[in-house]
């Protein structure tokens, strides 16, 4: 064992580099299982996948080289797992209490090596929650231009370990060894001391942040995120099964439609590059030069000028935008219909074509989206590489995701959950009655708008009712309602939407009043919180929509995480959670276990609702279904 004396900031500690198996066993057996330890790992690229982008990150393409444990007093143990063997640490990891930074990473690698669901907290999640409670990006920094030690007051943003350390302790961490080669036979002293320091920093950050978690009453939300790390680790490890032959056929069809759409666009746009904002702006000014009213009303970009650009060039007119969601009111123009069709299939080809194929995992053949807890303002799971939250919702696309032979996907979502939460929070009698009676709230709204009995409401009328409920329930003003509806392919007069606005607010008076109470609360406190206490600071400009929406959407996010935890606890022996998309959960099960998994997932979602709202109506909160393909299972719901 090699020992190094280290000092960082005001902390003096020893780094003990352990390579001997017997010595490691003796040290681990002597560690107190009841105290909190700082934990970190360093991973090396698997020799068979050294060139893969995820090598060293994905557990299937990596090996654990170092395991670092800081005892909170003065010893940071750096265990060389390659020399010692991972089995030495299994019992300790199962029994101990730990904190890591971005702990999903550690949890995922440790799970893959045979130790699932260890008791591990996360200093990154703590930082995100505390930062959300304390700071707003719109507040001015009252500090002097520089700290006494010369550090700029503009400390690193984000929640990486070095950024959090700098914010909390005003010291800069040297991270140059982070990307060093951890597969070398003999590690350098710099690598060893860097690894030992990470465990120390994680522990120190956690000890600084935990009292603030309690101060801001974030304990319940933090515990939910902490427990949910293992759901995320499981989803990332399992991945989504894909029928790649089906995907290839889809791509072939998308390319054909895109090329046809490009030919149709050429009639209107000539040689204009449809993907160039500059050229499209020039086309628009020329094409509609004799129709100034079109140019005057055309939507523009919302991107603000930088202060430097403003000072240098003065005020600048914002450019016209051709974002698909902003072009709904121009569907009467054939050139815009052609452009939208091109954009739709261009995005499918660019986002879900060859770029998706490149994300096919080399060992599982699946897609393995990365999920992130705690990063969004409302608390919803975010996703990347690829972003599963952005997957198209149509059945044809989702049927690309197919269970392997002998298996099925069990799918369920939290039905109309945000509307249910509007009813639960506000106790609006009309909303509550609809859910209590098991009725369709969209049909009820359509019935009021079109003055027809509920049983006679048509599908197009129900779609209008849905648009009104979703738009106005989240604070949309009457003037924007018509535009929002156009984007959904609904054409009605301005007078109709004005009437719809008045009908909605007169029907759900109690809910509208509750929204105002949330706005008043946010105005008074400067923040709003979810049911389990996640805080979000708001500016005055955000309050009207964000105050009630954060409560509803943030609590819906908490409910979904709780439902997945309950599902994992009750059916992990025969089902694996493979994805979470918005309010939807997907399980992979053997075909014979599908009926049991359907019951389990539905029960978990209903139980989560009742846990958060003991008097809530849980009827029809979830209705799971199973099929080989995701789209087919969803269609059954």
Image (spheres, rainbow, N blue to C red):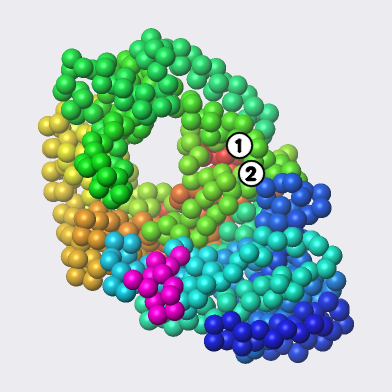
Choose between 259 and 564: the one closer to the eye: 259
What span is in magenta?
145-156
Per the image, the residue denoted by label 2 is 367
Secondary element under disc 2, as helix, strand or loop, is loop
Q: Is residue 43 above or below residue 369?
A: below
Position of residue 12 measured from the top left corner of the image (x, y, whole percent):
61, 88
Position of residue 230 measured from the top left corner of the image (x, y, whole percent):
60, 64
The circle on residue 356 is 1
Find out whether residue 153 is within the magenta segment: yes
Residue at left offset 33%, top offset 62%: 137
Residue at left offset 74%, top offset 46%: 51
Separation of residues labelled 1 and 2 (CA atoms)? 8 Å
Choose between 37 and 622: the one closer to the eye: 37
Q: Is residue 405 above or below residue 258?
A: below
- In screen coordinates, is 587 left or right of 583? right
**1 and 2 marks in contact (CB < 8 Å):** yes
């Amino acid at each position: 064992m090699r020992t190094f004396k280290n000092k960082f900031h005001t902390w003096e500690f020893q780094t003990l580099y352990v390579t001997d198996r017997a010595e490691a066993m003796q040290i681990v057996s002597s560690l107190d299982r009841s105290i909190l330890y700082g934990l970190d790992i360093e991973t090396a690229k698997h020799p068979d996948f050294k060139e893969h982008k995820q090598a060293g990150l994905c557990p299937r393409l990596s090996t654990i080289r170092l395991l670092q444990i800081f005892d909170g007093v003065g010893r940071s143990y750096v265990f060389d797992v390659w020399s010692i063997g991972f089995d030495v640490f299994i019992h300790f990891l199962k029994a101990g209490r730990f904190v890591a930074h971005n702990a999903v990473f550690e949890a995922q690698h440790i799970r893959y090596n045979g130790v699932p669901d260890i008791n591990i907290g996360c200093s990154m999640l703590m930082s995100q929650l505390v930062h959300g409670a304390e700071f707003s990006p719109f507040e001015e920094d009252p500090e002097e231009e520089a700290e006494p030690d010369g550090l700029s007051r503009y400390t690193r943003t984000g929640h990486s370990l070095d950024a959090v350390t700098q914010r909390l302790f005003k010291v800069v961490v040297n991270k140059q060894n982070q990307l060093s080669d951890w597969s070398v036979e003999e590690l350098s002293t710099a690598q060893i001391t860097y690894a030992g320091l990470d465990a120390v920093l994680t522990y120190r950050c956690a000890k600084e942040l935990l009292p603030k978690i309690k101060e801001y009453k974030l304990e319940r939300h933090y515990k939910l995120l902490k427990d949910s790390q293992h759901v995320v680790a499981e989803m990332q490890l399992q991945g989504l099964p894909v029928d790649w032959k089906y995907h290839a056929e889809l791509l072939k069809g998308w390319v054909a439609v895109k090329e046809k759409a490009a030919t149709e666009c050429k009639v209107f746009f000539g040689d204009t590059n449809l993907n160039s904002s500059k050229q499209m702006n020039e086309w628009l000014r020329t094409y509609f030069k004799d129709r100034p009213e079109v140019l005057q009303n055309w939507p523009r970009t919302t991107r603000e000028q930088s202060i430097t650009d403003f000072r240098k060039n003065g005020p600048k007119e914002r450019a016209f935008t051709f974002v698909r969601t902003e072009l709904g009111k121009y569907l009467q123009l054939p050139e815009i219909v052609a452009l939208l069709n091109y954009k739709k299939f261009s995005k499918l080809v660019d986002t879900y074509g060859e770029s998706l194929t490149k994300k096919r995992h080399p060992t599982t053949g699946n897609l393995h989206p990365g999920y992130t807890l705690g990063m969004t303002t409302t608390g919803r799971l975010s996703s990347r590489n690829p972003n599963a939250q952005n997957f198209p919702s149509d059945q044809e696309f989702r049927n690309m995701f197919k269970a392997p032979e002998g298996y099925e996907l069990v799918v369920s979502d939290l039905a109309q959950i945000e509307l249910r939460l509007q009813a639960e929070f506000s106790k609006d009698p009309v909303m509550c009655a609809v859910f209590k009676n098991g009725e369709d709230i969209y049909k009820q709204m359509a019935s009021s708008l079109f003055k027809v009995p509920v049983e006679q409401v048509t599908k197009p009328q129900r779609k209008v009712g849905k648009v009104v409920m979703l738009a106005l329930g989240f604070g949309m003003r009457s003037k924007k309602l018509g535009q929002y509806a156009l984007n959904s392919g609904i054409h009605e007069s301005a007078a109709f939407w004005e009437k719809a606005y008045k009908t909605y607010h007169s029907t759900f008076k109690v809910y509208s009043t509750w929204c105002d109470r949330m706005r008043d609360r946010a105005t008074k406190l400067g923040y709003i919180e979810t049911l389990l206490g996640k805080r979000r600071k708001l500016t005055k400009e955000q309050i009207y929509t964000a105050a009630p929406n954060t409560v509803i959407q943030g609590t819906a996010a908490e409910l979904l995480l709780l439902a997945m935890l309950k599902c994992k606890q009750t059916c992990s022996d025969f089902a694996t959670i493979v994805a979470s998309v918005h309010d939807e959960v997907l399980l992979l099960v053997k075909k014979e276990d599908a009926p049991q998994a359907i019951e389990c997932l539905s029960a978990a979602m209903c139980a989560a609702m009742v846990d958060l709202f003991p008097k809530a109506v849980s009827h029809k909160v979830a209705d799971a279904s199973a099929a080989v393909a995701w789209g087919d299972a969803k269609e059954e719901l």
